[in-house]
Amino acid sequence: MEREKRNDMSFSRKRSFTFGAYGGVDRFTCGDEARPESVEQNILDILDSPATETKPFLSAGSNQRGTELFEIIEKLQGSRIDEQRCAFPPPLKSQLLKMGGELPLILPPKLGGYWIDPPLEKLVDASPTLSRRGLDPESYDIMERDSEAKIYHEFFHSRYHHSFTAVDPSLGPLVLSVCLEEEEKRLRVILRMKECSLHGVFSVSLFANMPSAAELAKMLCDSVTVSRFEVVSYLKAPELITAFDEHRVSPNFKFGILYQKDGQLTEEDILSNNEESEEFKEFLSILGETIQLQGFTGFRGGLDVCHGQTGSDAVFTSFHGREIMFHVATKLPFTEGDPQQLQRKRHIGNDIVAVVYQEGHTPFLSDVISSHFLHCFLVVRRVRRGEEEETGTVAYQVSVTAREDVPPFGPVLPDPPIFTNRSLLREFLLTKLINAEISCYKAERFSRLELRTRSSLLESLQAELSTRSQCMMGDPTLSSLPSSEGVRGGSEGSGGFIENFKRAIRVRSHSFETLGVPKKIGGIVTQKPKLSEKDGESDKSPGNKTPFTDSVGPAELKDQASPQEET
């Protein structure tokens, strides 16, 4: 009995120690690496010593025990940082590729999992004195995240059309929109399903009689088995449908900027930089304008514009109708005594793409920043060659690395990847950054999360349209429903598609590691949590541990609130 009680005490005490050191992960019970029994016994012996027997000034043994305790605690707390530390891969030290005496901008991690562009073997010939091929600004096209998202708004919203809903036994909720274009004598149809939306145009001459909603749905998707659709009579249905179709479309982007000095190989070293060199400031001026955060009215990218808790200034720019906020590591708050710099990483660690500016010849390791969200890095280094000294021109070399499940994206790097024109470099980098983020959404983790979010939103939309339509038709059982204005206005505690849509966009995901558990995202829609007045601001505390998992809305997967919140 006494032994069992001692085991219970042992478990609770070990858990309390590891909670402070590992952010809630019980290393003694969950991990494969077991602590030596002697270490555990030392902790228990010290904790089990009665307070009345403690004589720090008289007993050398007690003093030694106390010293051992603090040493153990320090090791436990420091081991987390050691786990995140990315050591320079020993095998690569003797195999570094050189290009004119300089090291490459990026080196692959020891365990792989990343691609690098251009490949390392091609960097041998990189030189600013060679002929420049591929510098064509006209080919710098910005990718569309969802090319068909605005079809409904463009071809249906302002025209007379009908929408229908159904629940298919195998496909789940369906929302169908049909528009008759009399001048062109054709039918335009959109079928929304959990996996995707299908769009089609059919000539009226193909039908002897006007087809039913079920027939049109089956023409777009053979898997549709439902034989009856309900007509949508809710007057504000177009507004709800538009919100669903365009829930992935955003004109705002946020990217991280890291400053890597010569000799810095670890995350702690890179995030601890405070001073900005003139070269780094010049590079920032290429990307955008340094603005004061206090009272800033543009897209803020999650930065504090009221109380100065995220620094006093930042880098911001507008680019082809899009607003971009940069999370510059050196401009974010620095915390003395915190080697992880959580106040900086809580923003940069939740970005999807980041720029790394190198000052020196030390390569950047693709996986040096521990983050579930960062999937791509654009690395830029100022090239110091004889041409620069003679002509006074400044050359920048660019390289890209991304996780292996991120598809390639444009614009294509020139050969060699050297830029001497500032405006051309800006055009290339900003286009590349936007396309990088859009391409990253196709990675396995993000695509799976987006699919679950879309499924939840579609289920909510179908239920909302069906219920509101029945209410419009005078169903007495639905007379107690709140007014549409209440749903649209988002009053506290109200339900409806608009409220669920806001939650899906804004609510933080508290665990990125649980992407495989559908009920987490489903809870955003079905549980209808109570939102705060600020609705969308993160409750992240500085004590949250890395790797960071407190991203924003699953649909956007980043800290981009709606225009109402940001402006």
Image: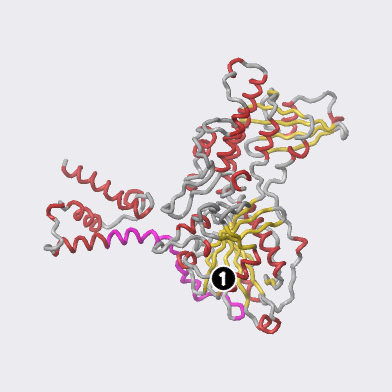
Three-letter code, disc 1? Gln
Q: Estimate the x, y position of residue 440 in percent, counting from the top left.
A: 61, 53
Residue furthest to the top in view is: 476
Relative to 5, 279 lies left or right: right
In the image shown, does 285 or 410 lie closer to the viewer?
285
Quick check: 62 above or below 149? below
In the image shown, does 70 or 375 lie closer to the viewer?
70
Q: Quick one: SS at disc 1?
A: strand
- Where residue 290 sits, quadrant-wise, is bottom right
Name which residue lies at 30% across and 49% down. Answer: 16
Q: Estimate the x, y position of residue 116 in percent, counting from the top left.
A: 60, 64
Q: Estimate the x, y position of residue 389 in percent, counting from the top left.
A: 66, 83
Quarter of the rendering occupied by the N terminus: top left
Q: Estimate the x, y position of residue 210 in percent, counting from the top left.
A: 81, 25
- Where residue 378 sits, quadrant-wise, is bottom right
- The residue segment tinted magenta is 71-100
In the image shown, does 556 or 225 lie closer to the viewer?
556
Name which residue lies at 55% across and 51% down. Answer: 302
Quick check: 215 above or below 57? above
Name which residue lies at 69% across and 78% down. Answer: 393
Q: Which residue is mark 1?
A: 358
Asked if residue 452 shows in the view, the reply is no
Say whether residue 19 is magenta. Answer: no
The secondary structure that most of the magenta stretch takes on is helix
Residue furthest to the front in view is: 295
Relative to 85, 483 lies left or right: right
